[in-house]
Image (spheres, grey):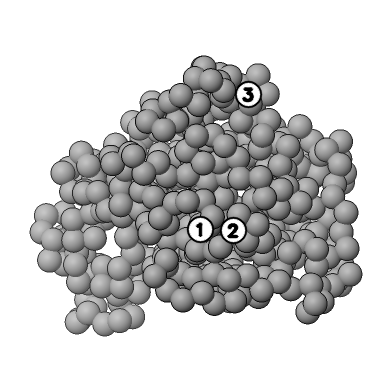
Amino acid sequence: MAAHAADVRMVDAKAVVSAEWKGRETRTVASFDVPPLSEDALTRFGGLAAEKQRATGFFRVEKIGERWWMIDPEGGRFVFAGVCSLKPESKLAAKEPFEKLFGTPEAWAAKTLDLLRVHGFNGCGGFSDHETIRKAEKPMPYTVTLGLMSGFGRKLGLTHADSGHTGYADDVLPVFEPGFAEFCATECRARLAAMKDDPWLVGVFSDNELPIKKDMLDRMLKRGGATQAAAQAFMTGKGTVTDELRRDFVEHVFDAYFRITTQAIREALPQHLCLGSRFHGPAKHASGAWKAAGRWCDAISMNYYDHWNPQKEHLRQWNEWSGKPCLITEFYVKGMDSGMGNTSGAGWVVRTQADRGAFYQNFALALLESKTCVGWHWFKYMDNDPTNTKTDASNRDSNKGILNARYEPYTPLLDAMRKLNSRVYPLIEHFDSAKR
């Protein structure tokens, strides 16, 4: 049955710790009369065992009717519910509990992947320890995050640490500098060749949160060298710089970026998915970047913050611009009952772990309803460790994890995640049948 107003919770939330609490309407799975799906209804990869599509032995994307899906290697329709930064921590606050609970990376992988399965997750998001995960006795679908532009920029001495991602000199991508294509090809051959035949690899992220500036053309025209020459070549015969040309140039830059990176990835992994560069904030409205990504990528990844509810217009526009489905590769909310300061990072702040779980359900429900999103990755596996002063400024003191920094689970959060995750496919059937 459809959601009723009485089933919508009000959750106190705020964008930053210093703000005032404000009640926000929040849907949960209790709003829907939909039973959980049993594990035997799934393929070993986590897709639907019923009504299988063409099996290729690898993950792919396909639009069936009005809805986009991932298709798992056995042909099962698959929605990618994952967790980011799934990797063992064995230093500082995590050192003693790691030794007590696991002792080895292999034992960590076995127990951790079981924890995810029990709570309905079916894969590992960005920045995970894919080498340990893929070698587990019972592996789980995983992704690889490369950092091709950031690695090349670092090689040229053009990068610096920024909050949550790599920063670039003048916020300019050195995509037109000599050697970028060769660098990408070399990196991909070295880092991806061993996974060429691995069905558990979903796909590859080329980078994370690249800068997208409206005045990218103006910036590149001032940079000098090959970057300036490329911008000048773009302007040939066009007269003066206009806002329309600025928008066209963003698409021009990202078309070059995605062409080069995708060709390098496909040379090493011809059967796996290219999942984009993990767009963030400014990309929400950058139509040119989405159009360029759509020409080269299989699905477009987006780290999606600043909104309590995924915006229908965003999801519609991204699909319209790119012609491809999206994958939400970061989102989270922080609980004040964790005992952490929660002053760093982009996620919302709520009062309790149960409220975190309600947020998760509300967010995922909107993504499932959209028909254009093929999955989401919660950021992240483990809380920030405040004693670790070597992390960037966005990862210092916040309750982002499904576990704290001592490997202790947030049970109310995980319980809510399980209730949603176990109903993903029945909820899709509910939403789709309601619109017929």
Q: Is residue 421 visible?
A: no
Dot 2 alpha-carbon crowd within 10 angstroms: few under 14, some 14 to 19, many 20 or more: some
| Measured Cα–Cα span from mark 2 to mark 3 | 29 Å
Residue wearing tag 1: 336
| Measured Cα–Cα span from mark 1 to mark 3 | 31 Å
In this view, the mark in front (1 or 3)? 1
Residue appearing at x 37%, y 56% in the figure: 344
Residue appearing at x 54%, y 64% in the figure: 350
Q: Depth check: 30 or 93 in front?
A: 93
Residue wearing tag 2: 352
Q: Secondary structure at mark 1?
A: helix
Q: Marks 1 and 3: CB-CB under 8 Å?
A: no
- The x and y percentages for residue 7 are 79, 72
Establish if 181 lies above or below 229: above
Residue wearing tag 3: 110
Q: Secondary structure at mark 3?
A: helix
Q: Depth check: 48 or 399 in front?
A: 399
In the rendered structure, the answer to whether residue 414 lies left or right of residue 380 reads: right
| Measured Cα–Cα span from mark 1 to mark 2 | 6 Å
Q: Marks 1 and 2: CB-CB under 8 Å?
A: yes
Dot 3 alpha-carbon crowd within 10 angstroms: few under 14, some 14 to 19, many 20 or more: some
Dot 1 alpha-carbon crowd within 10 angstroms: few under 14, some 14 to 19, many 20 or more: some
Residue 240 disc label: none
Q: Is residue 66 visible?
A: yes
- The x and y percentages for residue 157 are 16, 44
Establish if 314 lies above or below 84: below
Q: Secondary structure at mark 2?
A: loop
First in sequence: mark 1 or mark 2?
1
Q: Depth check: 60 or 110 in front?
A: 110
First in sequence: mark 2 or mark 3?
3
- The x and y percentages for residue 45 are 72, 35
Q: Quadrant of residue 71?
A: top right
